[in-house]
Image (cartoon, helix red, strand yellow):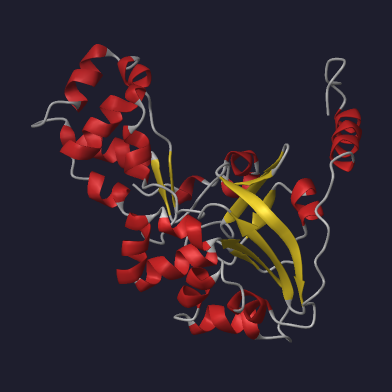
Amino acid sequence: MKLEQPLPSDPDALEVLFHKGIDSLQDMPADKRRADQSVYKILRTDPDATIFCSMVEKHANLLSRLQDLNSGEHTVLVPLDESWKHNGKLMTRMGGDQDFREAVLSAHISPHYVTTDTLVRFLNIPTILTPDGANGPQLARTRRSRTFQINDAATLTTGNIIAKNGIVHYLDRVLTPPHSSLSVLQSFSELSLFNKALLELELADDVAALGIKGRTIFAPTDAAFRALDDEIFDFLFDPKAGYPYLKALIKYHICQRHRLHKPDLAEEQHRPSHIFQR
């Protein structure tokens, strides 16, 4: 929707404008030709979903979800076969790491019935991937412009294929797992001192781990470190005298077993001091 005037500041007016915009978007028609079949049966007979199906079949719990007609409805975001072929490293890891493969597949399945119309209105869709320590399930982020975007990377190519136990949407890319915390930290030049501390204090391997435990890192920038008194700064980065204290300081900025998103920090129940692991 083209805006002819500035956005209103009133929240209610913004909500009205938002719904007016999404109501003007053309939705995908529903395909009900196989509505009497399970999600799995629909996918198993689709030549563009053979790779996804073959991997799901290796996990009885996932296969059961897509086959069972009596345990609720699921939404499955299915990467087309062609999209898997462009992810050689991912496929290699999934072939040798059963837990990782299950996590990737789970990130493509929601325990809720989500049409494309719902995707427009709810910008975060819960999946069945719930890492230990997270505050809830892993979310698939959705965005609608001219097309449906999932996690700012994959485009929904065909959607609203109705099954008896759910609904199927096809994607042109695989929803890859997040990068390790360490690789994200190292991508920011303004965190060079924090990254140096992680490496020299032998904390980097733990931060780099892609395991299932959740964590939140409050990373001080170089400017934050430099804002310390010069004597304190020099002491902390002294390998002999200051490193034990620097290690304690770094750990104080890492919240283990909790994955806090920005909105969570505004809620009182997510801010008890005891969650910080020293």
Residue at 55% in and 44% down? 153
Residue at 63% in and 59% down? 170
Percent coordinates x, y for residue 217 in the rendering: 41, 41
Q: Is residue 73 left or right of residue 81?
A: right
Q: Is residue 237 above or below residue 158?
A: above
The image quadrant that residue 2 belongs to is top right
Percent coordinates x, y for residue 251 in the rendering: 32, 42
Percent coordinates x, y for residue 268 in the rendering: 64, 44
Q: Is residue 189 above or below residue 255?
A: above
The image quadrant that residue 116 belongs to is bottom right
In this rendered view, identify the residue nearer to me: 97 or 262.
97
In this rendered view, identify the residue nearer to me: 4 or 85.
85
Q: Which quarter shows the N terminus? A: top right
Residue furthest to the left = 240
Residue at 84% in and 45% down? 26
Residue at 49% in and 58% down? 82
Q: Is residue 30 left or right of residue 67?
A: right
Percent coordinates x, y for residue 93 in the rendering: 32, 63
Q: Is residue 230 left or right of residue 38?
A: left
Residue furthest to the front = 47
In this rendered view, identify the residue nearer to me: 203 or 94.
94
Q: Is residue 232 above or below residue 156?
A: above
